[in-house]
Image (cartoon, grey):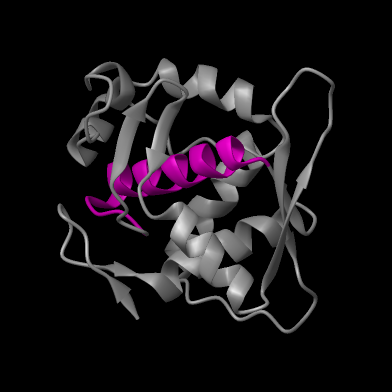
Amino acid sequence: MALKTKKMAKIDTQKYESVILYIAQKLGGEIRGKKKLAKLLYFVDFDYFEKNSHPIIGDTYKALPMGPFPEHMTDIIQELSNEGKINVKTVDERPGYNATEVYKLVSGDLKFNLSMDEIKIIDRVVQKYGHLNGKELEILTHAEAPYVGTKSGEIIAYELAYYRGTDFSISA
């Protein structure tokens, strides 16, 4: 199944789901926070684009006040939940703060629709950023050329990834 978008011809939902499930597995079976997931997906797509001139997922990312946000992430999460691949729950972690959405893998045999090159980039992103919370990732993305070079509320051009200067020879 493929989602139609305004900017991209289509998004491969199986690939999108695979990336989210793979990240969750690498993070011990869950991803804590919508903001964290959004930023990890941004790093996966923009790292891969910077290195290979095309993204893995290909979602449209908007420059929102809390950083880049993928347009179709919420729909994909809902689909994963409907398919019984993840459980989504809301947790009040700290008084005075918004509740955290937690995406927990449902046990089962996971198959990922990912190439070895894609897995390498995702592993690098998880190793480099997976231990950070949403706020820390927000701060990092705010310093990135793609976000800085885009007006608030506008779509972030993938080509701005070339201004990041990532050294892929160094492990995270």
Q: Is residue 72 left or right of residue 157?
A: right
* Residue 172 can be seen, yes or no: no
Q: Main secondary structure of the magenta part?
A: helix
Question: What number of labels is visible?
Answer: 0
Task: Give how far across and how far down residue 159 sits, in percent.
Answer: 18, 37
Question: Quadrant location of residue 143?
Answer: top left
State which quarter of the image contains the C terminus. top right
* Residue in view at x 36 percent, y 49 percent: 48
Task: Give how far across and how far down residue 127 sits, in percent.
Answer: 65, 42
Question: Quadrant location of residue 77?
Answer: bottom right
Is residue 48 one of those drawn in magenta?
A: yes
* Residue in view at x 57 percent, y 27 percent: 137
Q: Is residue 54 left or right of residue 119?
A: left
- Above or below, 151 against 46 in this view is above
Q: Is residue 130 left or right of residue 168?
A: right
Q: Nearer the viewer, residue 6 or 95?
A: 95
Q: Nearer the viewer, residue 26 or 92?
A: 92
State which quarter of the image contains the N terminus. bottom left
* Residue in view at x 27 percent, y 34 percent: 161
Q: Nearer the viewer, residue 7 or 28?
A: 7
Residue furthest bottom in the image:
109
Point out the stretch of residues depicted in magenta: 33-56
- Above or below, 21 against 32 in this view is below
Q: Is residue 143 left or right of residue 62?
A: right
* Residue 38 can be seen, yes or no: yes
- Above or below, 143 against 93 in this view is above
Is residue 4 one of those drawn in magenta?
A: no
* Residue in view at x 30 percent, y 21 percent: 145
